[in-house]
Image: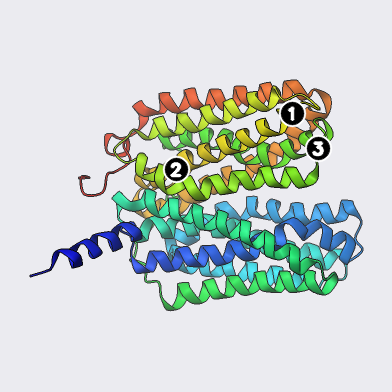
Amino acid sequence: MISMPRRRAGALARRAGLGLSRELWLVEIGILLNMLGYGAVLPFEVIYLHNGRGFSLGTAGLVVGLLTGAAVLSAPVAGPLIDRFGARITAAGAGAALAAGYAGLAFVHTPAQAFAAAALAGAGNGALNPSQSTLLTSLAVAELRHRASAVSRVAGNAGIGIGGAVGGLVASYGLPGFMLLFLLNAATYLIYIAVLVVVVREVRRPRPDAAGYRLVIRDRAFLHLLGIYLAITAIGWGFFSWVIPPYARNHLGISGRLIGLQLLANAATVMVAQVPISRLAEGRRRVVMIAAAAALFCGACLLVLTAQPGAASAYPKLVIAQVAVGLGECCFTTTLSPLIADLAPEGLRGRYMAAAGLCFWIGLAIAPTVGLQLLAAAPAATFIAAAAIAAAAGVSAVTLQRRLPVAARLTPKPGNSP
């Protein structure tokens, strides 16, 4: 007979593990390592190419832009590969491309070499996101997918935050430090590949439907969700990452150090709130969580709009806005991948995740491209437009409810799902 203390200890262990398997936790640790390396190089990519390698600022910007541009092209290509060969193998191949690309960037001397390495890394980045999302949803039972997604978000934000801090210390050594950062980033992808190849065992998937993306674009509920995702990404991730910092510096007169701290407030919010919000979502309508995210983004845009240059309340308003955005990200990401997995036929899940990944990259590209142009012309109109887009996404989310299959409308509650 099991003693009461042992039973209590077992219950605590299950709660701490959120019900996730050992394989899932190893993949989550791999994501943490990846983001540690990526977070270490992310703030210094342009600085390294411009100051360390002597490229013009414009050329350095084009090289870094190619990291996103190549991802836009490779994301849809990754879908069929995931469905045919499995998410594990595709993720390992994407990790290899990223490792080779970032290792190559460490040794570039000419723009041509940098463009080639960036194209390789960008292609890997576009393929890694959908394959990783597919792998997480395939390793987790349906009622725990939202928790697996939540843990991956915590791991990603923690990795980027810690990596950025470590990267700043290493980068202080100049060119050798920059080179070391890129090589360490490449090494984290190699470790991730080793975990995928040696430890993770993916369940064999059904043979993919030959119709492929033609079936994907016929799924009206999924296309509706993609439209919402594009808007949410452009505002919640792109706008607050690329438009708010220059607005805060040039219009509100806030120092670079304080701008960095308010961005840290966003990451810290996600790390603290993501798992509790994933538990809060259990048993609730998914469209309500999406609409809540949109409402938080809308409110954050309007709050920043009320900040006045030189006012004592300007910076606290920025911090509160970033916390609100972090909470919105938690609400949305708790819902997104599990809902896509529920909508996707088993043999087409890779294509569904790849289509979502494509929307993510396009949303990130739209925000700085359009947002910064509008900011230069009419700052107030920029925030009103962003708030309106977020509000429209929230309304659209509510109308999505009637298109969703009944079984996909609620976030499962572990132990009570069908």
197 to 213, vertically: above or below: below
Comparing labels 2 and 1, the label whose residue is closer to the camera: 1
In the rendered image, which quarter contains the C terminus?
Answer: top left
Q: Dot 3 lies on which element?
A: helix
Cα separation, mark 2 vs mark 3, equals 33 Å
Question: Counting other residues with Cα less than 10 Å from the Cα at mark 3, is it few (<14), some (14-19), or many (20 or more)?
Answer: some
Comparing labels 1 and 3, the label whose residue is closer to the camera: 1
Cα separation, mark 1 vs mark 3, equals 15 Å
Q: Give residue 357's position: percent from left, percent from top.
A: 55, 48
Q: Quadrant of residue 410?
A: top left
Comparing labels 2 and 3, the label whose residue is closer to the camera: 3
- Amino acid type at circle 2 is Leu
Q: In which quarter of the image is residue 265?
A: top right
Indicate left or right for 313 with 387 as reference. right
Q: Dot 2 lies on which element?
A: helix
The earlier-in-sequence mark between 2 and 1 is: 1
Q: Dot 1 lies on which element?
A: loop
137 to 291, vertically: above or below: below
Residue at 74 percent of width and 62 percent of height: 168
Q: Mark 1 points at which residue?
A: 312
Q: Give residue 86's position: percent from left, percent from top.
A: 43, 64
Indicate left or right for 24 with 367 as reference. left
